[in-house]
Image: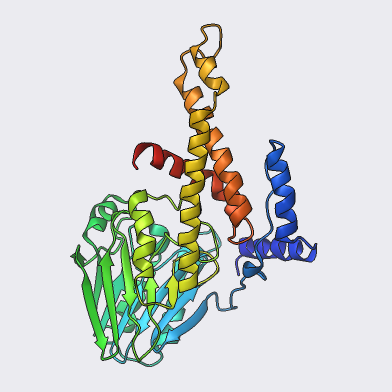
Amino acid sequence: MTRSLVIIVSLLLAALAAGFVCEDELAKCLKRIDKGKKCQGLPLPDNLLPPVTVDAKGYNLTEYRKGVYSVGESQYFMMIVKTSSQLIVVDGPEGNFLIRDANGVPIGTTLTDAIKEIAGDTKFKRIKIIYSHQHYDHIGAVPFIYSYLETAYPKAQIKILAHSAILKPLINGDRPGFPLPTVLFDKKKVLKLRRNLKVIIKPQCGGHTPSDLIIHIPKTSGGVGVAYLVDVIFPRWAPPYNLAIVTDIHEYIELHSRILALDIEVYIGGHFTHVGTYQDVLAAKAYLEDLLAASAEGLAVSSSTPLPAFFDVMDPSSRWWGNLSHFVKDFTEAGVAVCSRIMIEKWGCRLGGVDIWVDAHCESIINFLRLDN
């Protein structure tokens, strides 16, 4: 476990030992908001306690059906699929998987150890690496993985699969020699591994990046259904930032329904502490629906309330005379305040991090409702 992770876990455990209960702190938080003050922060909900710990080998390995694994380290997850002759490696995150020298320079990844553990003495004939999307935090360890696979399986055919939209960002990136995809596509691709196991790869543009892929393993007599989609839904957590740096909110909203239409029991979202379930996807959709309603309420309030900034901008004697940015900021903040109060009360003790990210969520959706909807 890295030093930073030890500190985080220690702080969380200390908070638990101190007796902080989310529901009690939520009541205090709402009182502060109603007095025009900032919420001081909420403890984690019960479903995130105790915090996840990582095995001494540097990763946690879970098999969900024969040959289908998640590999996690409390911040990132990836997926590996194995048969008697084939290996599929979905992503290669950086995070705490990276092994660094004394100067902090990456020199390897514990993901190669995870592959060794899964592979055992299997001699793979075909190996596929899949890039779920273009962001290096999820594929940055692939050079180490690719080098290991070439050495360990010199007779295997190794291909890298990715959405066609990924090529330009990778070529323009600042990582010379980064393994580029050998198979590009923008339509559904099906990998049939054995009679009751197949991997369906669907391009999904716009929910997070133009190069997003949904990797779906349908439910069969051989095991549970699994969906892998990164940086959209964060099981048991609120999305970070402005809904995880969403590029297309229309697509982001629709994605939740598309995932729920899949026959799955397991959802791997690529980040944070837990692999999810169908119920976690339902919760994420419910959060988004409440966020849309709360943002609409906030927008209605800011649109109908006389704001001091409006008069400042119109007043030649004011320092803000003619400064439209001052009014836009005041207009947005008034709507965000209403939206955030609603969302914290409903979700502050149901998903981790709501109190931290909700202002960004409300601002994103308010702007979406004003400009795009």
Q: From the viewer's perspective, is 210 left or right of 245?
A: left
Vertical arrangement, residue 67 with respect to residue 150, above or below: below
Query: Is residue 373 or residue 205 the one in the foreground?
Result: 373
Q: From the viewer's perspective, is 205 left or right of 30?
A: left
Q: Position of residue 57 (x, y in %)?
A: 55, 78
Query: Is residue 222 or residue 166 the one in the foreground?
Result: 222
Q: Is residue 346 visible?
A: yes
Q: Looking at the figure, which quarter contains the N terminus?
A: bottom right
Vertical arrangement, residue 316 with respect to residue 65, above or below: above
Vertical arrangement, residue 55 with respect to residue 42, above or below: below
Q: Is residue 157 visible?
A: no
Vertical arrangement, residue 364 with respect to residue 62, above or below: above
Query: Is residue 212 or residue 321 the one in the foreground?
Result: 321
Q: Position of residue 50 (x, y in %)?
A: 67, 71
Q: Position of residue 145 (x, y in %)?
A: 37, 73
Q: Looking at the figure, which quarter contains the C terminus?
A: top left
User: Going by the picture, which residue comes out furthest to the top?
Assistant: 317
Q: Which residue lies at the image location 44% right of the left edge and 44% below the top edge? A: 365
What is the count of numbered marks? 0
Q: Which residue lies at the image location 26% right of the left edge and 86% below the top edge? A: 193
Q: From the viewer's perspective, is 97 left or right of 203?
A: right
Q: Position of residue 80 (x, y in %)?
A: 38, 78
Q: How is the image coloured?
A: rainbow
**Quadrant position of residue 131:** bottom left
Q: Which residue lies at the image location 32% right of the left edge and 80% below the top edge? A: 218
Q: Which residue lies at the image location 48% right of the left edge and 37% below the top edge? A: 299
